[in-house]
């Protein structure tokens, strides 16, 4: 029997995660309602000022995704830590890097799915209009979810084993995410309000650079996080 | 009183070189401390003495001797505290990054403890330096804080490294703590080049790094004096945090085979 390639392991890990999710659909349900509740709370906190709400909508949307992502990321690692499932996966045998890519892509897909569900709700709540094309908006949302998942998966693996992991993950993750989140919010805002100043390119550039950097860092460093010696 | 030394004639010109001489001696003492184990009991005391004497000298030089700046008047004098302290913070984070990389290549409690020590001292100097910057910004910019790239990246740096130190507190297994925090330290360091170059890359309200070419030589001299003073303090601080970290490791680790054979972990032998 030959060793499985990185790609086949990666696909298997993604399929496994999505299958676990599909059987209960507990995580996506919780995420969607949590994100909607966050969006509602932001609107209540600001009051019924539609102009301000529409102006700040990209920020609220991304904060909703960010808060939900913490739940999603820690849950995705909790199922691996429980009953030492991760050790079983590694003995399969699956290389640590393939597991990282699989988990991170799975998390990205999960977050993107969440975004697709709450986007219409945000559009309705804040009375938004998409001026620069819907496909572009979905692309930006995907890049932003990937930017959250790359360091998020790495940090979730660290925090999952530590004490007070629910405090630790946001504490470690949020500051690192600030440049990626800023670029996502700005790019989303530009798409919603129209690219008058031609600044979409630079924000997408920053977001892509953030993605490249953190996906490579995660790919390089993840084996050291889950090794057991 | 203020301009008693301003005319730099043959007898006073040597003063311009004094920071360089002091810097060389501080670096030499630091090297002696690192490479000669017997010297470790007293070198830090000498460094501390140098720092204390230089603080007194700094009070005279920075507050009275140097002339006020053309545009900002006396307000600019905070540069002699703000700039070197942020430099020390960046040096601390750089040492932390180096230790993290080294640790992942070869496990050792020395690099682990040094990483912890340099990060905590770096956070200290960063917090003080940024606070002093805010004190300077109120009369100069009209606000303590603005959301400018330089200030934002500096704030991110503080929060990231506070998270790094928090992770070290939250993990009890010393092996895992060392590996994970090394990974975290490498990811965290991404912010530092962005912080350094932010004033060149973006249009920032914070001024760019000055060079000795554009600054009066008296001011350059006092700034270098101050930086040398903080560097010797930095070495003393890091050494003491390192001792504390090593003592904590020695208490946690039952079989200290990863510790170096010789004297750099004094608490182990007892």
Image: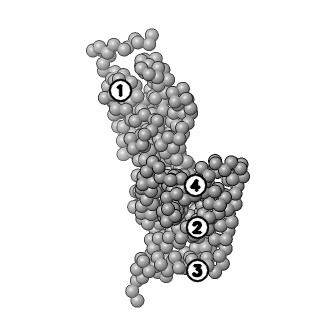
Q: In the drawing, does residue B6 fall left or right of residue A87?
A: left
Q: CA distance from mark 2 to mark 3?
A: 19 Å
Pointer 3 chain:
A
| Mark found first going from the N terminus, 3 or 4 | 3
Pointer 4 chain:
A
Q: Is residue B263 visible?
A: no
Label 3 Cα neighbours within 10 Å, binned few <14 / some 14-19 / many ≥20:
few
Q: Position of residue B107 (x, y in %)?
A: 44, 61
The local secondary structure at tag 4 comes to: helix
Q: Position of residue B242 (x, y in %)?
A: 49, 47
Question: What residue is shown at x 53% (from left), y 70% (from top)?
Answer: A109
Q: In the drawing, does residue A220 fall left or right of residue B214?
A: right
Badge number at residue A58: 4
Q: CA distance from mark 2 to mark 4?
A: 14 Å
Vertical side of A215 occupied by A56: above or below? above
Which residue is at the far left?
B10
**Circle 1 is placed at which residue position?**
B215
**Circle 2 is placed at which residue position?**
A116
Q: CA distance from mark 3 to mark 1?
A: 65 Å
Q: CA distance from mark 3 to mark 4?
A: 31 Å
Choose between A14 and A85: the one closer to the eye: A14
- Determine contact: label 2, label 1, CB under 8 Å: no
Badge number at residue A19: 3
Q: How many marks?
A: 4
Q: Position of residue A29 (x, y in %)?
A: 67, 71
Choose between A58 and B178: the one closer to the eye: A58
Vertical side of B150 occupied by B247: above or below? below
């Amino acid at each position: 029997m030959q060793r499985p390639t990185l790609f086949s392991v990666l696909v298997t890990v993604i399929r496994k995660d999505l299958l676990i999710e599909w059987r209960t659909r507990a995580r996506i349900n919780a995420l969607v309602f949590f994100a909607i509740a966050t969006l509602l709370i932001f609107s209540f906190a600001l009051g019924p000022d539609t102009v301000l709400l529409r102006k700040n909508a990209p920020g609220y949307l991304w904060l909703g995704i960010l808060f939900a992502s913490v739940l999603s990321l820690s849950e995705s690692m909790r199922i691996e830590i429980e009953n030492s499932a991760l050790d079983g996966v590694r003995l399969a045998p699956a290389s640590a890097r393939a597991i990282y890519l699989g988990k991170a892509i799975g998390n990205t897909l999960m977050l993107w799915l969440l975004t697709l569900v709450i986007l219409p709700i945000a559009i309705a709540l804040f009375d938004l209009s998409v001026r620069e094309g819907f496909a572009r908006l979905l692309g930006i949302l995907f890049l932003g979810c990937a930017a959250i998942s790359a360091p998020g998966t790495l940090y979730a693996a660290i925090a999952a084993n530590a004490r007070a992991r629910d405090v630790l993950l946001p504490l470690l993750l949020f500051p690192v995410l600030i440049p990626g989140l800023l670029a996502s919010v700005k790019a989303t805002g530009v798409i919603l309000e129209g690219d008058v100043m031609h600044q979409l390119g630079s924000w997408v550039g920053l977001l892509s650079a953030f993605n490249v950097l953190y996906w490579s860092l995660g790919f390089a460093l993840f084996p050291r996080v889950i090794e057991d010696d | 009183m203020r301009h008693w030394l301003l005319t730099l004639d043959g007898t006073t010109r040597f003063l311009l070189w004094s920071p360089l001489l002091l810097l060389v001696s501080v670096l030499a003492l630091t090297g002696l401390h690192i490479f000669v184990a017997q010297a470790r009991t007293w070198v830090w005391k000498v460094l501390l003495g140098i720092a204390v004497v230089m603080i007194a000298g700094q009070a005279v030089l920075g507050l009275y001797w140097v002339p006020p700046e053309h545009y900002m008047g006396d307000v600019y004098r905070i540069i002699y505290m703000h700039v070197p302290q942020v430099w020390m913070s960046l040096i601390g984070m750089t040492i932390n990054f180096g230790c993290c990389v080294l640790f992942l290549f070869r496990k050792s409690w020395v690099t682990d403890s040094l990483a912890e020590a340099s990060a905590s001292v770096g956070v200290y100097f960063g917090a003080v330096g940024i606070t002093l910057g805010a004190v300077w910004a109120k009369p100069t910019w009209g606000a303590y804080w603005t959301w400018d790239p330089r200030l934002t990246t500096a704030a991110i740096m503080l929060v990231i490294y506070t998270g790094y130190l928090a992770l070290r507190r939250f993990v009890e297994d010393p092996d895992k703590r060392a590996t994970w925090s090394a990974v975290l330290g490498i990811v965290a360091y991404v912010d530092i080049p962005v912080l350094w170059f932010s004033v060149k890359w973006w249009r920032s309200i914070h001024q760019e790094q000055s060079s000795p070419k554009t600054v009066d030589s008296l001011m350059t001299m006092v700034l270098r004096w101050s930086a040398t003073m903080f560097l010797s303090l930095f070495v003393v601080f890091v050494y003491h945090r390192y001792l504390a970290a090593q003592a904590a490791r020695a208490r946690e680790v039952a079989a200290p085979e990863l510790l170096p054979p010789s004297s750099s972990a004094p608490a182990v032998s007892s």
